[in-house]
Image (cartoon, grey):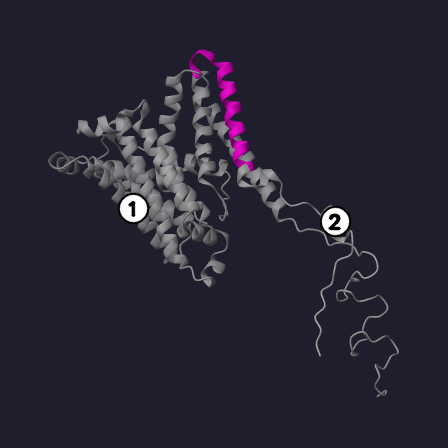
Amino acid sequence: MSETTTATPPAGSAAGASDGGSKGPGLLAGPLGRNLGLVVALLVLCIVGAITAPGRFVDVDNAVTILRAAAVIGVVSVGMTFVIIGGGIDLSVGALVALSSVWATTLATQAMAEDFHWIVMVATAVLVGAGAGLVNGIVIAYGKLVAFIATLAMLAAARGLAEIIANRRTQIVQDRDFIEFFGGDVLGIPMLVIVFALVAAAGWVLLNRTTFGRRTFAVGGNAEAARLAGIRVQRHTVWLYVLSGVTCGIAAVLLMARTTTGSSTHGTLLELDAIAAVVIGGTLLVGGRGTIVGTVLGVLIFTTLANVFTLNNLSSSAQEVARGVIIVIAVLLQQRLALGGARPRKKARGGPSGAAAPGNPTGAQPGGSATPGGPAGARPGDSGGRPPA
């Protein structure tokens, strides 16, 4: 006859476990707390700008300038967020923006756009970015090449190919309808900012409300566990880099509209800005955690910082130093929060009579533990009702 016994913890033992042990991660360790900290940092930058350049920073036109500057890097950063959450890295995004802009502004492409519609230029830029991202994904997922090396090779190859196609010349966008559409505004909001907002919103939905997003977190958190759970990790990794390439193509379109050119020099060091914005936004470089909202706030922090420096006539060198310091501080805070959230709790101390003694089953009394090889509950010297051997 078997009997199931549920041990009731003594009074005060649960409290002792929570009071004596280390508490779980606080508010700042969660996405809401991290994003709140980014909002505070952005507000501090705005206050500094309003104090140091009161006549210019608080102007509406200056706010529009900040948002327009954030559009290109923001679109690229959305794609970079997915890649980094998935446990990868993409150093080729700046070169892919250049290659997409050059390919979309060749004479042949613009002639097709003139005969049909300027949407041909947009489709060309997006397809070129997606194709290059597909190559990155295949080499990394199926070629087993480290993402750092694979995307670094793509950076060099894409930039070189862009120079060959453009013959090291700047290509002018001839289609006025294209420039007017993307260079215009809707209700006073620039089209560039609207596109950035749409991409960020689509990225948020994809990351937080779809199976693709859940799989991205799973692959970045533990690729082997994700594989055992039935996720096709290699195929998913390919799609992450394709998504990054698509955002590079969209960013190339925005850059073509801003500058009315396609050039092999577009997007120089854009990969560093995108990675910095993503890291500032709270995405872990090791993968498995991140938010689109945090990335958007990180982009706004960097563009606002650059604007404050420009309005105060500070050198770009000082701006780069400040950016480096911010990145280091952000990574250190990430590590501290990650370690704080993973710190194990202390074991509860033994309670009053009836509490389990260390190493004994629940409810076992000290002194009544089983002797080695004897039945449970037998005391030393007790034969348990059987004749001695």
Instruction: Assign a secondary structure to mark 2.
Output: helix
Up/down of 113 relative to 208, above or below: above
What residue range appears in magenta? 33-57
Left or right, 39 with reference to 188: right
Few, some or many residues within 10 Å of mark 1 (<14, 14–19, 20+): many
Q: Secondary structure at mark 1?
A: helix
Asked whether residue 196 is drawn in magenta, I would say no
For the residues marked 2 and 1, what is the alpha-carbon distance in whole angstroms?
55 Å
**Category of crowding for the residue at label 2, using alpha-carbon neighbours closer than 10 angstroms: few (below 14), some (14–19), many (at least 20):** few
Residue that protrudes farthest toward the right in the picture? 381
Residue 68 x/y as whole percent: 35, 26
Residue 64's quadrant in the figure?
top left
Instruction: Name the amino acid, label 1.
Output: Ala
Q: Is residue 54 magenta?
A: yes
In the displayed structure, would residue 366 be above or below residue 189?
below
Q: x%, y% of residue 175?
A: 17, 29
Determine which residue is flagged by label 1: 130
Residue at 69 percent of width and 51 percent of height: 345
The residue under the point 47% across, 63% down is 228
In the figure, 41 relative to 25: above or below? above
Visible residue check, residue 110: yes
Name the mark nearer the viewer: 2 or 1.
Answer: 2
- Earlier residue among tags 2 and 1: 2
Residue 15: mark: 2
Q: Residue at x 26, y 29 (%)?
A: 182
In the foreground, 2 or 64? 2
In the rendering, at what x and y percent does residue 290 appear? Answer: 48, 43
How many marks the image carries: the answer is: 2
- Vertical relation: 48 (above or below) 39: above
